[in-house]
Amino acid sequence: MNLSFILHLQDDKTFQADYIFIDGLAFHQQGVKGIFENYGPTKFSNTNYECGFFSNEEQGKTFYELIYKQVTWIGNNEEGFLAELVRFDPEGRMKWSYKGIELSGKSTQKEIESFMDKSAEPIKFSGRDDDNLFSVGGYFQDADDGFFLLLKQGYLIEFHYWSPC
C-alpha cells in the first residue's frame, strides 16, 4: 500500500518487525498455516499494486491477500505473509503488540502518541468519507517500509502496513 502522501516518517521511531504481533500471530508469517489455524481458510485474492514491495509487476512475483473481517494478510508462499491491514474493534478484542506493549480499539490517542513518541496528525484518506482521522507512523528498523496507526474520535481504529513506491 503506497500512502507516502500522508506519511511523514523521517524522524519517527523505528520498530523491529520480529517483535510485532497481531491478534497473537507474528506480524510476518512464513506461510498460511498459522493464519488458517487462527482465522480459518480463505481464498487467495489477487493484488494489483502499481508499485511497492507487493507489486506483482515491479517484484516479478505474484502476491495475494488473505482477507478476513478484521485483518488482511498480504504476501505469497515464497516470501511469507505480512499483516497489511488490521481493523480494531471498540471492545478491544483485536490486539496489536510490541515488546510487551499492547494496543487495541480501547487505546486512546494520548496513549498511542506516548508509545510512538510523536503526536498524531490529521489526515485525509482518498476515497474515504470519514472526518477527524489522525495518523501516526513509524519505519521498520533498517528498512524502507513501515506502518501507520489510524485514529478516529480519539481511539485506535486501524493499523496499515506501508511500503514505498
Image (spheres, helix red, strand yellow):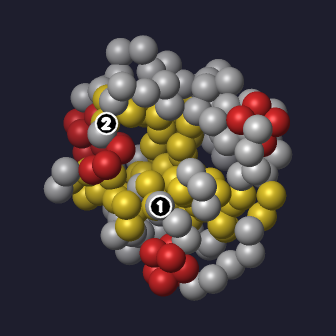
Label 2 and label 1: CA atoms lie apart by 19 Å
Reply above or below: 38 against 135.
below
- Residue lying at the far top in this picture: please name it: 10
Q: Amino acid at mark 2?
A: Phe
Reply above or below: 25 against 122.
below
- In front: 147, or 119? 147
Q: Can residue 142 be seen from the camera position used here? A: yes
Residue 52: percent from the left, percent from the top?
67, 32
Q: Quadrant of the C terminus?
A: top right
Q: Residues within 10 Å of mark 1 (few under 14, many from 20)?
A: some
Q: Amino acid at mark 1?
A: Gln
The picture quadrant where one finds residue 54 is: top right
Q: Residues within 10 Å of mark 2 (few under 14, many from 20)?
A: some
In the image, what residue occupies the spot 74% across and 68% down? 44
- In front: 14, or 102? 14
Residue 96: percent from the left, percent from the top?
36, 58
> Which numbered tag is attached to residue 153?
none
The picture quadrant where one finds residue 126 is: top right
Q: Secondary structure at mark 2?
A: strand
In the image, what residue occupies the spot 54% across and 56% down? 80
- Which label lies toward us, 2 or 1? 1
> Which numbered tag is attached to residue 30?
1
Q: Can residue 107 be seen from the camera position used here? A: no
Residue located beneath label 2 in the image: 15
In the image, what residue occupies the spot 46% across and 61% down? 29
- In front: 97, or 6? 97
Q: Are marks 2 and 1 in contact (CB under 8 Å)?
A: no
**Horizontal relation, residue 43 to residue 157: left or right:** right
The picture quadrant where one finds residue 7 is: top right
In the image, what residue occupies the spot 80% across and 58% down? 46
